[in-house]
Amino acid sequence: MKTTRQILFILILLGMLLPFFQNNFLKIPLLPLVGVQDTLGEPKFSFRGFLDLSYQESEGSYLAEKAGFRPLLVRLKNQVDYSVFNYTMSGGVVIGKDGCLFLESYINNYCGIEFRGVRKIDYEVKRLALISRELKKKNVDFLLILAPGKASFDREQIPSRYRKKNITNYGYYSKKLAVSGVNVIDMNAWFGKLKEHSPYPLFPASGVHWSSYAVALAADTMVRYLERLRNIDMPEISYDKVRMSDTMKYSDNDAGDLMNLLCATRNSPMPYPEFHYRSEGKHKPDAVIIADSYWWGFITSGISRNIFGKAQYWFYGRDIFEDEKKTGTVAAVNIHQELEKQDVVIMLVTEATWMLFPFGFTDAFLKDFKPETDADKALQVEIMMDNIRRDPKWYRAIVEKAARNRVAAEEQLRTDALYMIGLENKKK
């Protein structure tokens, strides 16, 4: 019994000392945590901080973050949570039925929990239609792609605690876009119909982005649409061989990676097509693509550089990538001059990013908008009203003025918007 107690004591002591030795002597390389960054700097000692205990709290947090074997211990805890309790606190990941993984942003948008509002969506659709018309004057075609979402696609796997509402961002946007005059490919609806008939998985169980095979289908559909739209003959994409693999590539395990487990989550073999292109005598249009992370599938597969001439990927409307290399920022370019060089401007959005859509693009494009028709003039007033609403101090002043004038706040807002437009026109 005494020997047993001694062994246990030594094991406990070693367990307590190992993190110290890892930090200072061992330096055993460990797999870093995905989606986790060290954010704390070493706190500076001060008597005031010592007396009010803030220094001790900061030092404790810093030491915990820098503890030896921390990534391994975090993965061990996460593995126990997942394997024993079917639970995770990692990166917004939601464990669905049959082990299907989601990000909560997809579920919230699919269920209508995050709904932008009818007025906001009506307003954005009008602006997109206006931009489409303005680009067409320069012989540039605008195309909006509604990419499929993991929650919509695998909705039967969503945990029962989520309840779908009657109105959602995708549902209302798609309805308004259908009668707006904007060129739209609704791949979300199309993939829902493909699900039962596809020979290969379109979404991985442990990932939230579309599979390589799904990207191939999407690219083929997009090419055919652009050919009709521009009356051109673009490169042909073929994949006579599709390799199935248990090793997840690209983004096929992105949700599983965020869980930071010791062992990989359950997944079915995924398809990886071997692409071939017939480009001789074909036309490769120049394009700007303003999109969320779903466009990366076109880049990593090589599709983008093989079907377009020069293609710029404006990632979330912020950073500019040409192929996989970042070449600048959107803020540093003249948007109108850049877009007028293109043959097509493509926007792509999926259900997880509706709250960010259209990624600041409409604001930037319409900054110096000069209306020509009565409809455009009415939209200009809406744009100015929206600018006022976004400035809390300015909007509060409008509400106070409305109270003094005994009129509705919306009426006063429109009056002030017309006044501001008049001032801007005089300056011009």
Image (cartoon, rainbow, N blue to C red):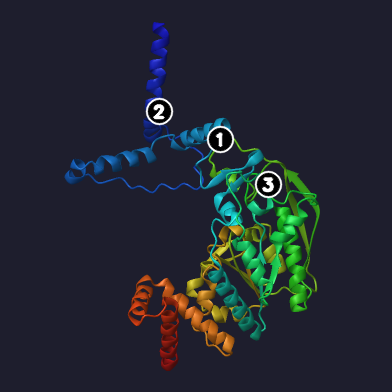
Q: Which residue is mark 1?
A: 82
Left or right, residue 68 beside residue 169: left
Crowd rating for badge 2 (residues with CA inside 10 Å; few <14, some 14–19, many 20+): some
Residue found 51% across the figure and 47% down from its top = 91
- Circle 1: residue type: Tyr
Residue depicted at x 65% and y 71%: 177
- Whichever of labels 1 and 2 marks the residue nearer the N terminus, that label is 2
Residue 244: horizontal and vertical position, in percent? Answer: 75, 45
Residue 240 at x, y percent in the picture: 82, 54
**Residue under pointer 3:** 156
- Are the residues at dot 1 and dot 2 in contact (C-beta closer than 8 Å)? no
* 290 sits to left or right of 44: right
Secondary structure beneath dot 3 equals helix
Most foreground residue, 351 or 271? 351
Tag of residue 18: 2
Residue furthest to the top: 1
Q: Secondary structure at mark 1?
A: helix
Q: Secondary structure at mark 2?
A: helix
